[in-house]
Image (cartoon, rainbow, N blue to C red):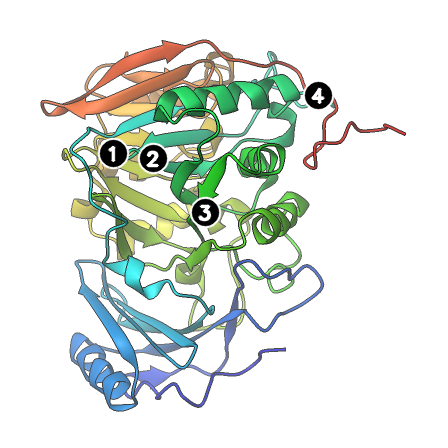
Amino acid sequence: MNSRFSPLIPPFEGGEPVEGIYNAGPMLADDKNGPTEEDALMRMYTGASDEDMDRYVGSLEHAGFSHVWENAGPAYHALSAWKNGVYVYAYLTRATGVVRLIQDVPGSWVEYCSGSARDADGRAEEICQYALYYDPKNGLTKTTTNCGMFYIMKLADGSLFMVDGGDELQCSADALEGMYRFLRDFTGVPEGEKMRIAGWFFTHAHGDHVAACIRLLRTYPEAFRLERVFFNFPSHTGIGGRCDSETFVLKETLREYAADVTAVKLHSGMTFSLAGTNFEVLYTHEDAVRPEEPERYPFRDFNCTSTILKMTTRSGGTVMWLGDTNVETEALVKTTVPASLWKADVVQIAHHCFNYLSSLYPMIDADYAMLPNSHYGGHTVENEPKLAEVVSCLSDPSNLWYEDQTTVFRFENGEYRVVKVLPRIGGEHDGTDLYGRKKNAE
């Protein structure tokens, strides 16, 4: 198994090297039984500077690495390059002076750090919070759940950008057919032609965030052309076996039903553009690893492996995707990511409104909020005060959209406005598993 850095990668000569390597996990390889040849490996250097990063660019070029990309932003000074199938990503966290040097997963992702998928045709992007079925008592049963989230964006060129995909219990046969029909209507692509998904972003490796992708690709294998997947799941065994089993079904599905997909492992400081919509990575689980314990992910809550992604539409509207971000991440990023980067027009409320983010929501200072939970779930005795801290930041308390219904909105004339509201399709789960089989069937 891969356990060391390639000799092709030149050493980072700035700062002080930290002994120990963190296994940052693979992309599509199955690592449930241990490390794989595709695992990303990370080592750290303390006391580094921008000048050290600039010199490292020269070292990579001198060593014959090509496609060298660099992004010197307010939070991170990042760079990437590749040579003979060896991929390198490095970034300096400006607030701490720590450089994380990553031998990245193999793949042709470098071009997406700064490139655009294809020319847009001028249409305004539309964002959809897609309705899922939540337990009416905010509980968990054999056929219902109180979590899950699914977002769909139509880019300016008519392609799709998807975020997560809900839980298996929210993907009954009826619900799945409703998703499919919605996507046909949303894109305007007629039956018999493939809908193009420019990218599918998964915030973290929990089962209530991946099911729709699995079910749609397996049920309608000729309906979609999935071009890219974006995520950064940690090493399953390296983090104590905490990645959900559903995420291994996701990887299996991608290998089988999207064989040509480009798998992009996201890292802090990375930027990419799809049809003129821009994305910036503000946090991944790699940021949590400390020089004092360079081989171990330190946070108690696995939800803190959620990648935080900021999106800016062609028309200027901004959306903050938080996944299931929790307070341990909040305590870190409020010191490493400048406040100016957090400001956004729309915030996806973290972790289905199950936890507070009392510092982060005011920094984001959104005018609109999307709750990946039902109205009831957001207003239980436990969740009401957590929701209230989000609402207190909004320009209008009514600028809050629940996932009881499908809400489509877009940015126009400096603000977001709802353009369509549709009822939820599908209810309690019908026993259909992620492979499309009826559970307990003969």
Q: Earlier in the sequence, mark 4 or mark 3?
A: 4
Q: Mark 1 touching mark 2, by CB under 8 A?
A: yes
Camera sees residue 382: no
**Residue position marked by numbered label 2 in the rendering:** 358
First of labels 1, 3 by sequence position: 3
Q: Callout 4: helix, strand or loop?
A: loop
Q: Nearer the viewer, residue 212 or 25?
A: 212
Mark 4: few/some/many CA within 10 Å (<14, 14-19, 20+): some
Whole-number angstrom distance, CA of label 2 to CA of label 4: 33 Å
Q: Amino acid at mark 4?
A: Thr
Residue on which disc 3 sits: 306
Residue 71, by quadrant, is bottom left
* Residue name at image x 44 percent, y 35 percent: 194
Q: Nearer the viewer, mark 1 or mark 4?
A: 4
Q: Position of residue 166 (x, y in %)?
A: 54, 31
Q: Earlier in the sequence, mark 1 or mark 4?
A: 4
